[in-house]
Image (cartoon, rainbow, N blue to C red):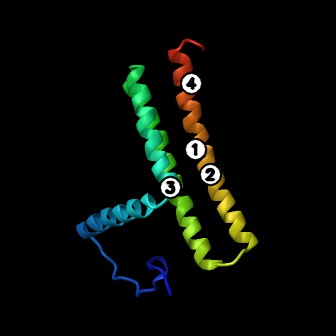
Amino acid sequence: MMSEHNTVRPKPARITGIRHVFAAAGYSIGGVRRLWQETAFRHILLALVICLALLFAIDASVMEFSGLLVLFFALVAVEALNTAIECIVDHLAPNWAEFARDAKDLGSLATMCLLLANGIYLGSLMLEYFEVL
């Protein structure tokens, strides 16, 4: 039995003009719906809420909020790409394969790098606020 993620259908007709903008928005919404199924994405959103609350608590500047949001959007984008890699790899290699492991490990590394960037940014703001730096 095929899951809904493995269903093969004919390629849809190409959409152009203003309809393409609306179609692209629909595809993005579909991506968010798919990403919501990932525990890591839900953890990222929870972390964002906590980090925003921390920045409100320390009366952070607009630029500091902007920096945090840019890093979190980058993290969400990389998590989406990591999930896409996992979907494709799982489809191409249902059994264990070295290329599959490597692809998943590299996607995980990309996500971890942005998690660290977010942590370093937030940590530096906290150290500055508490006058440790």
Dot 4 and dot 3 residues touching (CB under 8 Å): no
Q: Earlier in the sequence, mark 4 or mark 2?
A: 2
Q: Is residue 26 above or below residue 54?
A: below
Q: Is residue 103 above or below residue 13?
A: above
Residue carrying label 2 = 110
Q: Residue at x 63, y 55 (%)?
A: 108
Amino acid type at circle 3 is Thr
Callout in the foreground (3, 1): 3
Q: Earlier in the sequence, mark 1 or mark 4?
A: 1
Residue carrying label 4 = 124
Q: Is residue 46 above or below residue 65?
A: below
Callout in the foreground (2, 3): 3
When asked about the image quadrant of residue 10, the answer is bottom left
Residue carrying label 1 = 114
Give the total of numbered labels: 4
Q: Earlier in the sequence, mark 4 or mark 3?
A: 3
Mark 4, secondary structure of its residue: helix
Residue carrying label 3 = 39
Dot 2 and dot 1 residues touching (CB under 8 Å): yes
Q: Is residue 60 in view from this perspective?
A: no
* Image coords of residue 32 (percent x, y): 39, 59
Amino acid type at circle 4 is Ser
Q: Residue at x 49, y 59 (%)?
A: 38
Drawn side of residue 56 relative to residue 119, left or right: left
